[in-house]
Image (spheres, rainbow, N blue to C red):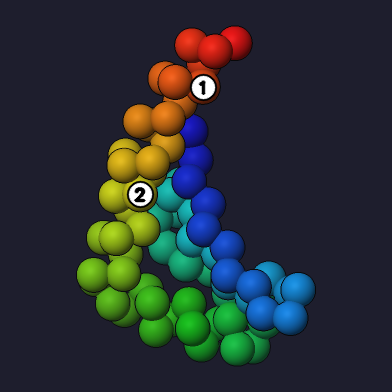
């Protein structure tokens, strides 16, 4: 299971957090600056890292039981 948090502006994805990397990655010049800012903020990384356990792992059991 991989948790992905994407950030868009004007229908263009400029940054993304993936649980497999454990950090933000920027795709545009603005996204690179924001990703660097978010990666240097330990509370932001901790928040996004715990989302996998809070949201994904909790709901995957419910989702697979319905199949």
Label 2: how many Cα within 10 Å (few below 14, some 14–19, many 20+):
some
Place of residue 2 in the rendered image (x, y in percent of width and height, measured from the top left): 49, 40
Residue 4 higher or lower than 39, as above or below: above
Is label 1 in a helix, a strand or a loop? helix
The image quarter containing residue 15 is bottom right
Which-is-in-front pick, marks 2 and 1? 1
Locate the C terminus by quadrant: top right
For the point 64% across and 73% down, which residue is it?
Answer: 8
Label 1: how many Cα within 10 Å (few below 14, some 14–19, many 20+):
few
The image quarter containing residue 48 is bottom left
Image position of 37 (left or right of 40): right
Q: Which residue does the numbered mark 1 point to in the structure image?
A: 63
Distance between mark 2 and mark 1 Cα atoms: 17 Å
Query: Which of pointers 2 and 1 lies earlier in the amino acid sequence?
Result: 2
Residue 63 higher or lower than 43, as above or below: above
Place of residue 56 in the rendered image (x, y in percent of width and height, measured from the top left): 42, 37
Place of residue 62 in the rendered image (x, y in percent of width and height, measured from the top left): 44, 20
Image position of 63 (left or right of 54): right
For the point 67% across and 79% down, which residue is it?
Answer: 9
Residue 6 higher or lower than 42, as above or below: above
Place of residue 26 in the rendered image (x, y in percent of width and height, measured from the top left): 58, 74
Marking on residue 52? none
Is label 2 in a helix, a strand or a loop? helix
Image position of 67 (left or right of 18): right
Residue 17 higher or lower than 39, as above or below: above
Q: Which residue does the numbered mark 2 point to in the structure image?
A: 51
For the point 60% across and 88% down, which residue is it?
Answer: 30
For the point 31% across and 79% down, which residue is it?
Answer: 40
């Amino acid at each position: 299971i991989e948790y992905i948090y994407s950030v868009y502006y004007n229908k263009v994805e400029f940054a993304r957090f993936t649980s497999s990397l454990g950090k933000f990655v920027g795709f545009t010049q603005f996204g690179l600056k924001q990703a660097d800012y978010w990666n240097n903020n330990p509370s932001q990384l901790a928040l996004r890292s715990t989302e996998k356990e809070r949201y994904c792992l909790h709901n995957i059991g419910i989702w697979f039981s319905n199949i």
